[in-house]
């Protein structure tokens, strides 16, 4: 039970809450977006012929859509990584806050072991 | 000197080189940890290159180019799906996996559900997926050696299998990491050169648009536009393929263990960036290689050498670059296959030796030597089994076979991995039933599908395997087997609810609060990290 309390203490720090909230705010919409965008291509090609229009020479809309998926992957990937690298500080802060919180709640000793 | 002699000389050189690296690496390969995950100290870009090396298998180089050369646009789905899949890996799986796992996928699951049944199920699915994947690689290797040396397919497959087994038993993961790095560089260089040869043809004049125009006018617009809608089953089959492609990577054991070789989450991220750029640039070249082969080798010549098109890329190299370039491309393809199979064998043998032998059979008490020996025996056993299964797969496209491996991974592993990370109520029963239902529903649907139940006289190039008409009309099972995997997880969790309470009390199931915090922060030893020293200066424990 003691061990459980320690994890919950980290979970309750404001830094950890900020971390989970920021992750969710990015990952949830990003995941929904890329799945919809990704499955759009097979849906449109498997059930319709709307993408069969030539755009540049013989390169048709289906190929343009396909190349756009490459661009989407790279852009989302960089957006995520630049954010996630910033979130690493929150992990250190959560650890720090959890220690301080413990020090406060155990009357300032903080090191029972 | 005849062309074939030149090819053979190059071939021997590459093999000597890979064995040399293996021998060198095996001298540094001191502990079990080195064998499984290269000691956990690999840099981001190295790991990124190694991931690309693992990922750009015979399916990518031989299979996709061949599929595009014979069928056009529908072959390109594979390129797109294989790439976008990295978003699933990066956004949802890579970091929690690194933060929770140790050597294998089962370790990650066991960090939450510490029961032999979970480890056994994970080991089973790892072995099944690796096996499917290996069949594909050996199939590609067989076609390549057949083209290169004129040997019979069966003999080629056996030869490559023996070579691979020697290689992996000697080297372990350190060797496969280095061989993947070397190979990824060679493969990219080779593909770029080959694409440049295609674009340099007078009719193309370094304008990729002309390539598409030429294909449209010389071969027909069917080769450039997506296949026309052909009813509900065919349409859903395309969706089913794409489900497997986009989810499968997040369940591939030999890719996932690459995230356990990095020291922290930041390195895991940077390695995905490197890998995704390399992999994406490579896949952008696949239409050039495929259409180039269709134009400059000719679809008839490709199909005559290999009915599934598996040798289109090396044939293109021969047609445009002459015998030496052909030998180089073939050697790169061969190194690719050796390296990928080696990675697969490591993943599968680690799963068996570490998860099943050590933790289930021996209750966690096997010495490093015993584990090592078990891993090597498994490596040999798995290689032989995959060899035997590769022989009936002769006339199938490599990329198609890999797509089936992706379907198995997406059905058996992905639901359990995602729910272990994200679902508070998930429990041991749910994990085991989810993995088993996902795995077996996928394999059974493949057996009932037109892939195996070919009917008595299937359309060429297929050869009859089970001569009865298919019971399941879809070629790709993921549309059904992935939801079944999730359903298995859900129902198992509901049914095992009371047992889960007991397990939690007995310490067999880790509290979700711990998993949640650990997976997001990488804190593994809470007592130590909260009580000792100043937390902000302290280096992250891994």
Image (tube, coloured by chain):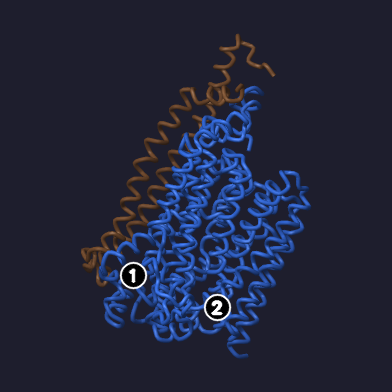
Chain colours: A brown, B blue
Q: Image quadrant for the C terminus of chain B? A: top right
Q: Residue at x 37, y 60 (%)?
A: B240
Q: Which type of secondary structure does the marked residue at label 2 adopt? A: helix
Residue B440: horizontal and vertical position, in percent? 50, 57
Residue B535: horizontal and vertical position, in percent? 60, 25
Q: Is residue B286 visible?
A: yes
Residue B10: horizontal and vertical position, in percent? 63, 78
Picture layout, residue A3 above or below residue B307: above
Residue B205: horizontal and vertical position, in percent? 35, 77
Mark 1 surroundings: few (<14), some (14-19) or many (≥20) residues within 10 A: many
Residue B144: mark: 2
> Chain ID for label 2?
B
> Chain ID for label 1?
B
Residue B73: mark: 1
Comes first in the chain, label 2 or label 1:
1
Picture layout, residue A112 above or below residue B140: above
């Amino acid at each position: 039970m003691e061990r459980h309390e320690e994890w919950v203490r980290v979970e309750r720090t404001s830094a950890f809450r900020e971390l989970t909230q920021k992750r969710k705010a990015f990952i949830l919409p990003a995941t929904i977006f890329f799945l919809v965008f990704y499955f759009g291509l097979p849906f449109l090609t498997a059930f319709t012929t709307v993408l069969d229009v030539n755009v540049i020479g013989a390169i048709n809309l289906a190929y343009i859509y396909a190349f756009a998926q490459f661009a989407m992957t790279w852009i989302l990937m960089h957006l995520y990584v630049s954010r996630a690298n910033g979130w690493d500080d929150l992990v250190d802060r959560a650890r720090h806050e959890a220690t301080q919180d413990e020090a406060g709640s155990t009357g300032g000793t903080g090191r029972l072991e | 000197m005849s062309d074939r002699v030149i090819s053979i000389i190059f071939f021997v050189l590459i093999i000597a080189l890979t064995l040399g690296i293996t021998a060198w690496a095996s001298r540094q390969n001191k502990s079990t940890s080195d064998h499984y995950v290269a000691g956990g100290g690999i840099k981001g870009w190295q790991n990124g290159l190694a991931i690309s090396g693992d990922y750009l298998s015979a399916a990518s180089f031989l299979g996709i180019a061949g599929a595009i050369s014979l069928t056009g646009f529908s072959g390109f789905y594979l390129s797109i799906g294989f790439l976008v899949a990295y978003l699933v890996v990066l956004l949802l799986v890579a970091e929690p996996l690194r933060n929770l796992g140790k050597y294998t996928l089962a370790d990650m699951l066991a960090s939450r559900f510490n029961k032999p049944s979970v480890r056994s199920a994970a080991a089973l699915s790892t072995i099944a997926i690796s096996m499917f994947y290996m069949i594909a690689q050996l199939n590609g290797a067989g076609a390549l050696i057949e083209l290169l040396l004129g040997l019979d397919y069966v003999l080629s497959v056996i030869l490559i299998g023996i070579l691979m087994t020697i290689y992996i038993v000697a080297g372990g993961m350190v060797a496969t990491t280095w061989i993947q790095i070397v190979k990824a560089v060679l493969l990219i260089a080779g593909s770029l050169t080959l694409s440049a040869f295609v674009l340099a043809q007078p009719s193309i004049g370094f304008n990729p648009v002309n390539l598409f125009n030429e294909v449209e006018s010389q071969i027909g617009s069917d080769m450039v536009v997506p296949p026309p809608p052909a009813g509900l089953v065919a349409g859903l089959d395309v969706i089913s393929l794409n489900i497997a492609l986009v989810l499968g990577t997040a369940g591939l054991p030999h890719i996932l263990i690459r995230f356990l070789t990095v020291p922290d989450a930041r390195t895991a991220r940077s390695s995905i960036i490197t890998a995704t750029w390399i992999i994406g640039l490579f896949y952008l070249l696949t239409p050039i290689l495929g259409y180039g082969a269709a134009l400059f080798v000719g679809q008839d010549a490709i199909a005559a050498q290999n009915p599934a098109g598996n040798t289109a890329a090396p044939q293109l190299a021969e047609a445009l670059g002459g015998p030496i370039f052909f030998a180089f491309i073939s050697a790169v393809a061969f190194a690719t296959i050796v390296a990928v199979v080696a990675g697969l064998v490591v993943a599968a043998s680690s799963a068996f030796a570490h998860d099943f032998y050590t933790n289930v059979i021996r209750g966690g008490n096997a010495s490093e030597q015993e584990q090592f020996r078990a891993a090597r025996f498994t490596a040999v056993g798995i290689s032989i089994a995959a060899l035997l299964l590769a022989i009936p797969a002769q006339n199938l496209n490599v990329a198609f076979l890999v797509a089936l491996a992706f379907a198995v991974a997406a059905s058996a592993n992905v639901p359990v991995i995602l729910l272990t990370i994200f679902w508070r109520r998930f429990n041991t029963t749910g994990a085991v039933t989810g993995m088993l239902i996902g795995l077996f529903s996928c394999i059974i649907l493949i057996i009932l599908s037109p892939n195996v139940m070919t009917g008595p006289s299937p359309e060429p190039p297929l050869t009859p395997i089970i001569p009865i008409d298919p019971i399941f009309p879809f070629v790709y099972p993921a549309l059904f087997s992935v939801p079944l995997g999730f359903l298995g997880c859900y129902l198992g969790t509901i049914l095992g609810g009371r047992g889960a309470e007991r397990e939690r009390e007995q310490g067999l199931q880790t509290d979700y609060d711990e998993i949640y915090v650990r997976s997001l922060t990488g804190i593994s030893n809470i007592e130590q990290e909260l009580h000792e020293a100043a937390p902000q200066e302290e280096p992250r424990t891994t």
